[in-house]
Amino acid sequence: RVSVSNILEAEGYDVLTAENGTEALNILEEKEVDLILLDIRMLGMDGVEVMRKAEKNSPDTRVILLTGHGSMESTIAALRHKAHAYLLKPISSQGLLSNVASAFALINEEKQKRILLRQLESSLQQLKDVEGASELAKSQARIIPLPDGVQADLARRELWRGNDKVSLTPSEGKLMEAFIENWGRVMTHTELVTLVQGYEVDKDEAPEVLRPLISRLRRKLSKFPDGDKWIVSIRGTGYVFDA
């Protein structure tokens, strides 16, 4: 224990020593430890038991097992608990340092990954916050004032005035949105069908597709003063929203 500690400290590592497994586990409860160099055969609690408890209580801590008495059982235990290395004593200082260095290369890589993941999670949360604010702004911006105190909420597909409120179907909402966004402009039958239904029809078919939808929307708008007159038919061409 003293020899290993001296070798590691000479290389610049911060080292804590423990005389037995219980003392080692007590250190883990108080301090953040990156790597344990653990003898398998110890008085009291053996190294495999210490490794098992350390894995449960400090899952990010890596373990290098040292033993002067290798066995199939200890090798299987090392594999089961994902020990970084399983070294037979006596081991040279160079062999020890090489294994410790490879362990710390993985430890630092995992730390960097955790930092990057936290940064990514933070960036994603910031993006969600920005998108949420943007969606709220869009929703607020889509409340349009209409004549005589009527309000149109295009996001919710609702129109209201005082206690009078009407809800629009998705198709009616798209049609109302198209009219409001093109207020005062004559829109052709085919143009309106494309905007509302999302597909193109020929010039002769478009009026037939559009007529029942226009009729339903006018009927709902009639709940408001002169609302049934807001949508004006342009013979042979289409409609204009002239509220």
Image (cartoon, rainbow, N blue to C red):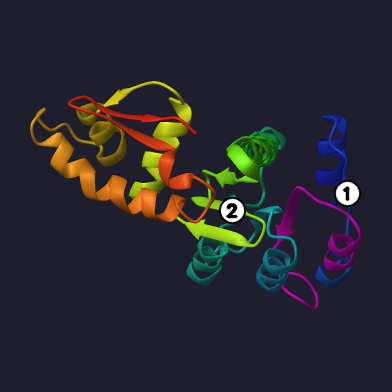
SS for callout 2:
strand
N-terminal label among 1 and 2: 1
SS for callout 1:
helix
x, y (%) of residue 238?
25, 29
Find the distance from the CA under tag 1 to the CA under tag 2. Answer: 83 Å
x, y (%) of residue 228?
42, 46
Residue that label 2 marks: 160
Is 149 placed left or right of 216 in the picture? Answer: right
Q: Which mark is residue 219?
A: none
Q: Is residue 37 visible?
A: yes
Near-viewer residue (237 or 71): 237
Instruction: Please name the amino acid that badge 2 sits on.
Output: Trp
Is 125 placed left or right of 3 in the picture? Answer: left
x, y (%) of residue 76?
49, 67
Quadrant in the rendering for residue 9: top right
Q: For label 1, count other residues whose C-alpha is less than 10 Å away and answer few (under 14), some (14-19) or many (20+).
A: few
Q: Which residues are magenta?
A: 25-46
Q: Relative to 87, does residue 41 appear above or below in the rendering?
A: below
Residue that label 1 marks: 2
Residue positioned most to the top: 185
x, y (%) of residue 200?
16, 31
Rendered residue at 60%/46% (across/down): 150
Q: For label 2, count other residues whose C-alpha is less than 10 Å away and answer few (under 14), some (14-19) or many (20+).
A: some
Instruction: Please name the amino acid that badge 1 sits on.
Output: Val
Rendered residue at 25%/41% (across/down): 197
Near-viewer residue (157 or 226): 226
